[in-house]
Image (tube, rainbow, N blue to C red):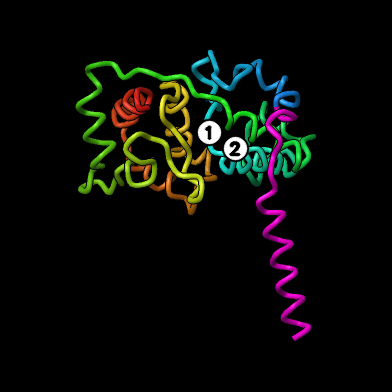
Amino acid sequence: MKNISLLICLLLSFSASSFAQGDAEKGKAKSVACGACHGADGNSAISMNPKLAGQHVSYLVKQLNEFKLASQTGGKEGRNNAVMNGMAAALSEQDIQDIAAYFSSQTGSAGETPEDFVELGRKLYNGGDLERGITACIACHGPRGNGTSLSGFPDISGQHTDYIKSQLKAFRSGDRNNSLNGMMEDIAKKMTDNDIEVLANYISGLH
């Protein structure tokens, strides 16, 4: 009985630490340096830098932890990015939780899909391409691109076209390899440059 009680206590302790809550107000103060690239409210004005506003807390925490891991392992583990590795290196777990809470609490700005990408983008996003083994994006990210927090799939709606293109190409080349169970790497490897162009433009207009 004592062993069972101890196991339960350990599990509860682990669960509490796994779902630590961030403080958005403290996160706002801690995220000042982030504003230079991502915008003060997480709506980056630079098309190659992602919008963070409205992103799921769990996803933001995962990425910051993986940038930090890359900084500690010389890029051998985690998500390797020269700028972000340095930014994340000194962050504590509470800092990460607070910053994630702040950006998640902000409202993401809408993007726009050029008219000539709407039909092709909708077809690929909603249906994928079975012959080439390309899974439909809607399966994980939903009809509006919002993803889901519990599953770990990010909100990609309204994201900058240039940023989406850069990440799909990074997944395709293997330069980025931190998606859940390698799903994005596997899918992106089957995409052409045109597929990526179409999807990036279409996703930018989802909201």
Q: Is residue 163 left or right of residue 141?
A: right
Q: Residue at 55% of width from left, 26% of height from top?
A: 53
Using the image, tell me which numbered label, if any, was put on residue 98.
none
Q: Is residue 16 magenta?
A: yes
Which residue is under mark 1?
55
Above or below, 106 against 56 in this view is above
Q: Where is the C terminus found, in terms of image quarters?
A: top left
Q: Residue at 64% of width from left, 35% of height from top?
A: 101
Q: Does the residue at mark 1 contact the one at mark 2 (Cβ under 8 Å)?
A: yes
Q: Residue at 46% of width from left, 35% of height from top?
A: 155
Q: Is residue 145 left or right of residue 43?
A: left
Q: Is residue 128 left or right of residue 144?
A: left
Residues packed near mark 1 inside 10 Å, few (<14), some (14 to 19) or many (20 plus) = many
Question: Which of these two is toward me, 16 or 174?
Answer: 16
The image shows residue 50 at horizontal and vertical percentages of: 53, 25
Q: Main secondary structure of the magenta part?
A: helix
Question: Which of these two is toward me, 140 or 103?
Answer: 103
Using the image, tell me which numbered label, if any, was put on residue 60.
2
* Amino acid at dot 2: Leu
- SS class, disc 1: loop
Q: Is residue 121 left or right of residue 181?
A: left
Q: Where is the N terminus found, in terms of image quarters?
A: bottom right
Mark 1 vs mark 2, CA separation in Å: 7 Å
How many marks on residues?
Answer: 2
* Amino acid at dot 1: Gln
Magenta region, residue range: 1-27
The image shows residue 85 at horizontal and vertical percentages of: 69, 33
